[in-house]
Image (tube, rainbow, N blue to C red):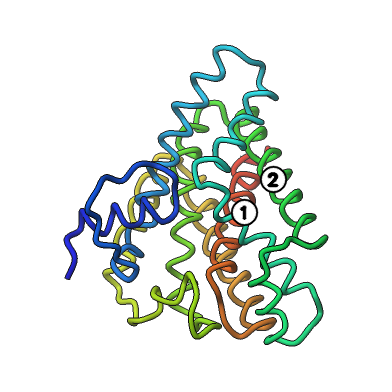
Amino acid sequence: MQKPGNDFRSALQFITILPSGKNINFSPSGMIRFFPVVGLLIGLMLIVFDMIVSIFFFQGIVVLFDVLFLVAITGAFHLDGVGDTADGIFSHRSREKALLIMKDSRTGMMGLVAVVCTLAVKFAGIYSVKAYCPATYVLFFLIIPAYSRASMIFGIKFLKYGRDSGTGYDFFTRKLELKDFLWVSIPVIISLFLGYKFFIINAAFGLLVFIILCFYKEKMDCITGDMLGAMTEVIEALLFVIAGMTMF
């Protein structure tokens, strides 16, 4: 069994461009539980980045930089999954053909549209959070990247992998246990400080995960690394929108 520190650094190396140190024994199955922790770190960095940029620019420009920061910090890793997944799933081809399309490094029109729409929704969501939730936006910035990356754990748990090899194959080599969801409790606990919004954000997260996994089940009866990345991006964008709704 790998040490927790090694598993965390593996997760950090896998889903961000942040330095994670040397001599890492890459641990695909061990890193899964630390996805929410890496999300919290991304959220913390987003808060600091936003505060610094806010000193120099108006809010619209700041939000644009926030979105670009989230793209850059992951090296557009998840965003690439959005494009590939959209190209495959919305190609109206068989499951096998759709999986081949996802594997193609070229981005088609559906993929391009999906990426642009995801970024646009995220921009609108972050703008709304800052405009309508001035007292709690820091908490939302902290927990939403954690929730979105935690969603991958549920995808790995409840759907089978769709390929015989690939980026995500090693995540499915063992059956996930309850302890693998332990760190998901951190954003949940932090969300308690949101008051009644705690119920809204957690219900929204659960519902979005359920809907996306059901959609994947219906369309593909499996999941891939690209589809995990797409789910991460879509949930992050939609949670920002939900957090920024004026009814809050």
Any mark on residue 79, and which?
1
Any mark on residue 119, and which?
2
Callout 2 amino acid: Leu
The quadrant of the rendering that contains the C terminus is: top right
Indicate left or right for 183 with 208 as reference: left
Rate crowding at label 1 as few (under 14), some (14 to 19) or many (20 or more) other CA atoms within 10 Å. many
Point 74% across, 60% down: residue: 107
* Residue 200 image point, x, y percent: 55, 52
* Residue 240 image point, x, y percent: 60, 44
The quadrant of the rendering that contains the N terminus is: bottom left
* Residue 88 image point, x, y percent: 72, 73
Image height of 119 relative to 81, above or below: above
Q: How many discs appear?
A: 2
Point 32% across, 71% down: residue: 29
Image height of 37 relative to 25, above or below: above
Mark 2 element type: helix
Rate crowding at label 2 as few (under 14), some (14 to 19) or many (20 or more) other CA atoms within 10 Å. some
Point 32% across, 62% down: residue: 31
Point 62% across, 70% down: residue: 211
Callout 1 amino acid: Leu
- Asked where in the image residue 162 lies, by quadrant, the reply is bottom right
